[in-house]
Image (tube, helix red, strand yellow):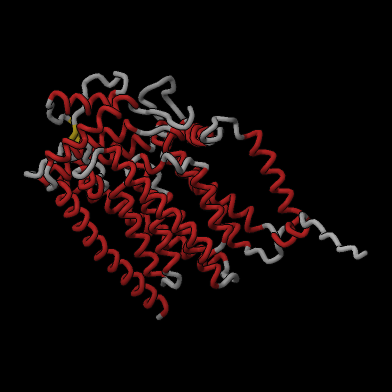
Amino acid sequence: MKTRMMTKHIMQILWHFFKLYWLLLIIFTLSLVLACLVPKEIVQKNIAKSIEQLLQQGDRPRILGNHKLNQLDNYTESVMLGIIYNHEPQQPLASALRAEYYQGSDSSEQDFRVVSLNDQIQYGLTSNTQYPRYWHGYIVFIRPLLALMPYQSVQKVLQIAFFMIFSILVAQLSKKISIIAALSFSVSLILVNISIIPLTIHASMVFFICMISMLYFIFHTNVALEKAAAAFFIIGALTSYMDLLTAPLVTFAFPAIVMMLMLNKQDNHLGIKYLLIRLVVVGMAWILGYALLWVSKWILTSIVFQEDFIAEGINAINERIGRQIPFGEVSQISSLDAIQRNLNTLYTYTITNYPIMPVAIPVFLIGALMIFLWHRKDINISIIVLMSFFGLLPYIWYAIAANHSYIHSYFTSRVQAITLFSVSYIFLYTLDWEKVKSIFKFPKKKNVQA
């Protein structure tokens, strides 16, 4: 009887996912088609206004210091702008699915991507390349903005929106969970260079999804497991819709951490089994949403154009999880190489380019000593164990997607914001702050009466 009820419950959840899947597939497709209907002349005019600054900057300019995390990704942005530039309102579905753009013939040319975009604009060249394996859902927001303003103004809009949401989120983390959670989240984004994220369209999209999802779970505390799983299914689907494999894990890990901390705040005696089951279920829902909607893009494009885009998608995944590097001095890598390369990106402080290890190691040792001497007695070990697991997730990702993580470490390294959050939270949570305050509290002077 119990097994039958469980089977029925699982079938109900899967049926709910099935309906969500079709709804999202329709919304995703229609949204792209509608975005492609925006008149191209005004969009192209504003992109043309933007090209001079992009040419001055080049493909991978570094601002605020000579460090990878200070690197803008005009290389990818030029492709994204090229796709938007080539949308045809007369063929909105074809434009949305094919994602065509112009690419020059000499890939070794300096600032190849920016120059390619400029060449199309200056010489009226037609598109000759396509990028159909991603949804490119960012177009839904960016193309209408580009009908109103040039790319550099779009960056400013993204900055304002990003820091508004970030400020609201930090305030709500402090109010609804703890100052520790707010501090940990702030530190994690600061150390992966929060100032650069909103300046790059493809990098900002996952963090917008991440922060809005975190706010959802802050304001929806008593969410049943079925609804939480549905929410993560949608989050995973939105990630595959917007993202170009920038830092997809942040849209799972941060909302899942918030969900866990909110549950723990309600009842700090929750066992690890309860929390782990919940995290596994929402994790599977996120993966299902991400994978189903991504593969659906390949299938839909193949059906519409009667071409095999599924094989192209599978080949791209095989390449990204492979160990071969098609250019540069290194041709073969290991998972460890990918992990080390992303770790090295955080080796120096983001802005000053000063080696951080001589500071980080003493801080870590002092922190460990402080925890040993002044740890809390009422620690929920479940939170510590699960936070440690979250901290390891980026390195599991790097080990799996080794090729992609190695080549694109200048932006994939930001996934380590999850690790920075986990480490910061464990340290701040474990300390007994009353003991710390009593140690460093100076005695008050007594008033001496004459």
The C terminus sits in image quarter: bottom right
The quarter holding residue 4 reads bottom left
Q: Total label count?
A: 0
As displayed, is residue 329 above or below residue 292? above
Residue 305 found in image quarter: top left
Residue at point 27%, 46% (across, down): 138
Does 19 sit above or below residue 308?
A: below
Q: Is residue 192 above or below residue 421?
A: above
Residue 243, visible in the rendered structure = yes
Residue 10: x, y in percent?
Answer: 35, 70
Question: Could you tell me residue 160's position as x and y percent?
Answer: 37, 48
**Does residue 334 appear in the picture of this structure?**
no
- Coordinates of residue 106 in the picture (x, y in percent): 25, 19
Left or right: 63 in relation to 436 = left
- Taking the spot 35% from the left edge, 57% from the top edge, the residue there is 235
Name the residue at the front extreme: 450
The reply, left or right, for residue 132 in relation to residue 68 is: left
Closer to the camera, 224 or 320? Answer: 224
Instruction: Name the residue at 17% across, 40% down.
Output: 43
